Amino acid sequence: MRRLALMPLLLALATPASAAPADPALPGLWPDPALVLRLAVAAVTHPAPEPHPGPAWINRLIFETSPYLLQHARNPVNWFAWGDEAFARARALDRPVLLSVGYSTCHWCHVMEAESFEDEEIARFINEHYVAIKVDREERPDVDALYMNAVNLLTGGGGWPMTVVLTPAGEPFFAGTYFPARDGDRGARQGFFSILRELDRRYRTAPDDVVAQAQRVTTRLQALATPAPPGAVPDADAIRNTVDAFARRYDATFGGFSPAPKFPRPAVLDLLLRVHRRTGDANLRAMVERTLDGMLGGGIYDQLGGGIHRYSTDARWRVPHFEKMLYDNALLVSVLLDAWQIDPRDDYRRVAEETLGWMAREMSDAAGGFYSATDADSLNPAGHAEEGWYFTWTPAEVDA
C-alpha cells in the first residue's frame, strides 16, 4: 500500500511543467521525465538503484519525428527545429542563430555531438548566447542546399555536419563543417568553443560589420539561385569544359578525381561514359575503367556484403569510411550497367548484382520504401559505438 500511495508523487515528478523557462541558464529544457520516473520507481522497489552517469536533459526535438533530430533530443543544447519559432526567438533576444545540419547516419555528426553538443559548458554558452537550430538534411533538403551553398562560398568546400551562423533574418555570416570542441583538439588551432565565443563577440561589438558580411553572402546566394532563362540548355562547350575539368583532376595511378579522401563520384563516371559513347573518346573510357577497377578491388567496396561505402580515406581505395548511402549505390549500379554495355566484363555484372542484392536485403523496408543510408558506427562488445566495427575483422577471425 505504501508503494501505491507513492505513485501520484512519482507521476508528478515525471510530468514536465506546462511551460519551460523562457531562457533557461542551465542546459536543456527540463529533466528527462522517463528517467525521473525510472529512477524514482527504482528507489522505491530497489534499495540500491544503478546510478546514472550524469544529468539527463530533454529539449524541443523530442516532439519531432526525424531520426536525426530525435538523436539530439537528449542534448543539453536547447535545440529548435527549423521554423518561425526559432527565428522569432532570435529576433526577440537579438541573438545570432547557430544552424547545425546533418543526418542520422553521419559519423562526424555523431562525433561533433559527443564532443561539443553533449559538453555542458559549451551547451550552456550556446543556450545563453545563441538560438540553436537542428536540421535533418534528408527532411529539409531545401534548407540544406541553400546553406551548403553558403559553406562552399565561404570555405571552398562542404560536408556534414554543416555549421552555419546566421543573423536573426536567416542571413549567413560564418560557415563550416565539423569543428573539434576546443583549441588543440585533433590538432585544430581553434576549436568550436572558441569560434562560438569569437562570433558572439563580433555580433555584439561590431553588428554593422556582421550584417554587411551576411548581406554580401546573401547577395551571392541569390545570384546562384536565379533560374536560367526559359529554354536555356548547356551547350557543347559547357559539357566539354566540365569533362576537361574532371580530366585535369583525374588520378591516373589509382583512378578517381581527388586525393584522399576519395569519393566514388558515380555521377561523374556516368557523364564520362555518356560523352565517350557520343564522341568515341577512348581516354574517357579509360578513366572510368581505371576508377572502377580501383573501387571494385578495394576496401571501399564491401567484398562480402555488397554495396559501396561512402568514401575511401586513402588514395588507393583501400580503407573506407564505412557509411553506405542508398543514392551512391543506386547510381553505381547504373554506371556498372552502362560500362557493361560497352565492355561486358563479369566483374561489372557481378558487382551490380551484389549491390542490388544488398539494397533489397538490407535497405528495403517492409512498407515498400528504402532506407537512405546505413551508419558507419556500430556497437562493439563493450557497448560503445565504434566506426567500422561491424565491417572489420581481426586476423584471428579471418583465420577462423
Image: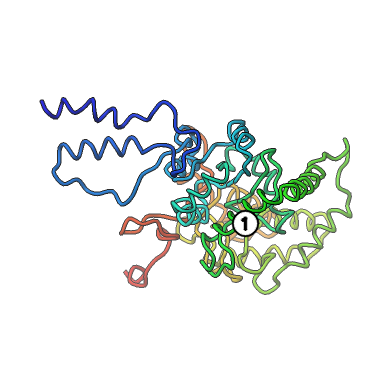
Q: Quadrant of residue 11?
A: top left
Q: Is residue 283 left or right of residue 390?
A: right
Front residue of 27/340: it is: 27
Percent x, y of residue 215: 77, 45
Q: Residue furthest bottom?
A: 253
Q: Secondary structure at mark 1?
A: helix
From this view, report whether residue 47 is shown above or below residue 199: above
- For the residue carrying disc 1, how many other residues have a C-alpha within 10 Å: few (<14), some (14-19), or many (20+)? few
Q: Is residue 390 left or right of residue 350?
A: left
Any part of residue 135 in sight: no
Front residue of 236/79: it is: 79
Tell me what residue is drawn at x 75 percent, y 58 percent: 272
Amino acid type, mark 1? Glu
Residue at numbered disc 1: 198
Percent x, y of residue 144: 64, 44
From this view, report whether residue 57 is shown above or below residue 382: above
Percent x, y of residue 289: 68, 64
Tell me what residue is drawn at x 60 percent, y 47 percent: 327
Q: Quadrant of the C terminus?
A: bottom left
From this view, report whether residue 5 is shown above or below residue 64: above
Q: Residue furthest front?
A: 205
Q: Quadrant of the N terminus?
A: top left
Tell me what residue is drawn at x 57 percent, y 59 percent: 194
Q: Is residue 200 left or right of residue 375?
A: right
Q: Residue furthest left?
A: 1
